[in-house]
């Protein structure tokens, strides 16, 4: 049973992560790697803790939350896989939770309820992210940071400012996790184009909120000649509204957690592979960027031993995508500036 589960998850991660090029997924000779999850007892944190416990690249799994961590840590720790699990439950344990981390994943913060935008979460989550990033700068300044907490378009700039203030900012190591947008685009495209979902690749660029999410279906593979412009518009809208679709279906009980944990596990796995020197690891992520005039932007990035090795450009866009790109810039710019201002003033 155990090996079946581990093999299934390995195989799912391998397939899901096989977006762009050849992958390495082997625990033989895998180096020691510590992964910390901040917000580990939450809706995303719990299934993400499970998936990271099943990842053979993880040797130490550090679970931190302000509530409920001991139970989650005890539960996950009984799974007979490589990672040694430790749970940390209050602020004075945050330093120990972080020390020595190679990758820190942050799903701490409040989720949306129906009728809210991601930006409505700023008030609460900006402060949470700021204090967690202050601790990261102090206790594991060299860690790769995977930011899940919303609004990602603002929380990533907040993190960058906190790290700059602390003198630890390395733009190669700060990532906004936009993998769920890619996961959704792949699923929706496969359904519409009637192609096997495991073979599908779709880059998603821009940011992570509403129209700032720009799936590039003109670059989707396998190519489908059966999709009309109306189909592409509908696929784009569904990808942009994917988070809201889940928020409404959950009717007040939160936002995407299970699909987000899957996406977060794919992205953290890609970061670990990059750190371990695996070649050709490419994922979309919201990073410091000069691809457009905006200081942060999501596009395909190559992951390596030091984090981002290369930020790829957008490639050729359809007229519809060019229009989407211009339309998203004012909103994305405002969200980035809001995050920077908050971090500078607080
Ligand atoms: N980037 C993306 O694609 C996605 C991002 N999200 C975002 O992820 C965040 C978390 O969502 P859920 O897990 O559903 O929420 P949740 O409320 O179920 O869990 C959040 C957890 O964070 C913890 N927490 C709060 N303050 C903390 C602090 N200072 N330090 C450590 N832990 C703290 C809470 O105790 C709770 O366990 C939300 O902001 C949500 O909008 C959700 C889905 C997709
Ligand atoms: O929609 C939300 O609030 C959560 C999220 O970011 C997503 O599911 O993409």
Image (tube, grey):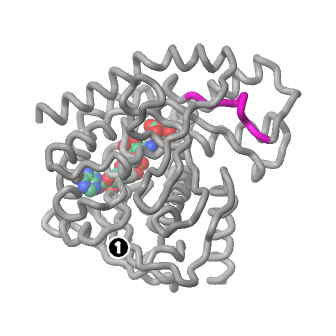
Say which quadrant the C terminus sits in: top left
Say how many tags the image has.
Answer: 1
Q: Residue at x 44, y 50 (%)?
A: 308
Q: Nearer the viewer, residue 238 or 115?
A: 238
Q: Residue at x 60, y 76 (%)?
A: 26
151 relative to 274, above or below: above
Circle 1 sits in a helix, a strand or a loop, which is it?
Answer: helix
Q: Residue at x 46, y 25 (%)?
A: 292
Q: Is residue 254 visible?
A: no
Query: Where residue 7 appears, x then y in whole percent?
Result: 67, 75
Write down the residue under mark 1. Answer: 71
Task: Kindly indicate the quadrant of the structure image that contains residue 227.
Answer: top right
- Badge 1 local density, few (<14 within 10 Å), some, or many (20+)? few
Task: Kindly indicate the quadrant of the structure image that contains residue 77.
Answer: bottom left
Range drawn in magenta:
214-221
- Furthest-right residue in this view: 226
Q: Residue at x 62, y 24 (%)?
A: 237
Q: Nearer the viewer, residue 226 or 293?
A: 293
């Amino acid at each position: 049973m155990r090996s079946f589960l581990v093999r299934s998850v390995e195989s799912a991660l391998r397939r899901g992560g096989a977006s762009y090029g050849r992958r390495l997924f082997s625990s033989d000779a895998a180096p020691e790697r510590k992964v910390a999850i901040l917000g580990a007892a939450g809706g995303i944190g719990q299934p993400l803790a499970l998936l990271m416990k099943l990842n053979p690249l993880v040797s130490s799994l550090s679970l931190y939350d302000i509530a409920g961590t001991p139970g989650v840590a005890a539960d996950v720790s009984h799974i007979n896989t490589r990672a040694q699990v430790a749970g940390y439950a209050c602020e004075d344990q945050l330093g120990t939770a972080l020390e020595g981390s190679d990758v820190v994943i942050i799903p701490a913060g409040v989720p949306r309820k129906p009728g809210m935008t991601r930006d409505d979460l700023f008030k609460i989550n900006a402060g949470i992210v700021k204090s967690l990033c202050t601790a990261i700068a102090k206790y594991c300044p060299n860690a790769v940071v995977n930011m899940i907490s919303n609004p990602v378009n603002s929380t990533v700039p907040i993190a960058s400012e906190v790290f700059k203030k602390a003198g630890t900012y390395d733009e190669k190591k700060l990532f906004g996790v936009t993998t769920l947008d890619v996961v959704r685009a792949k699923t929706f495209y496969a359904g519409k184009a009637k192609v096997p979902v495991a073979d599908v690749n779709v880059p998603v660029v821009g940011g992570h909120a509403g129209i700032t999410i720009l799936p590039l279906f003109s670059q989707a593979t396998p190519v489908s000649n059966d999709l009309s412009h109306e189909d592409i518009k509908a696929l784009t809208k569904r990808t942009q509204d994917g988070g809201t679709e889940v928020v409404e279906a959950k009717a007040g009980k939160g936002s995407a957690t299970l699909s987000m944990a899957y996406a977060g596990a794919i992205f953290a796995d890609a970061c670990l592979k990059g750190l371990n020197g695996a070649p050709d690891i490419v994922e979309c992520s919201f990073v410091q960027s000069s691809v457009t005039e905006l200081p942060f932007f999501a596009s395909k990035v190559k992951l390596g031993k030091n984090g981002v090795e290369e930020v790829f450009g957008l490639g050729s866009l359809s007229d519809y995508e060019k229009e989407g790109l211009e339309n998203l810039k004012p909103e994305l710019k405002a969200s980035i500036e809001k995050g920077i201002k908050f971090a500078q003033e607080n």
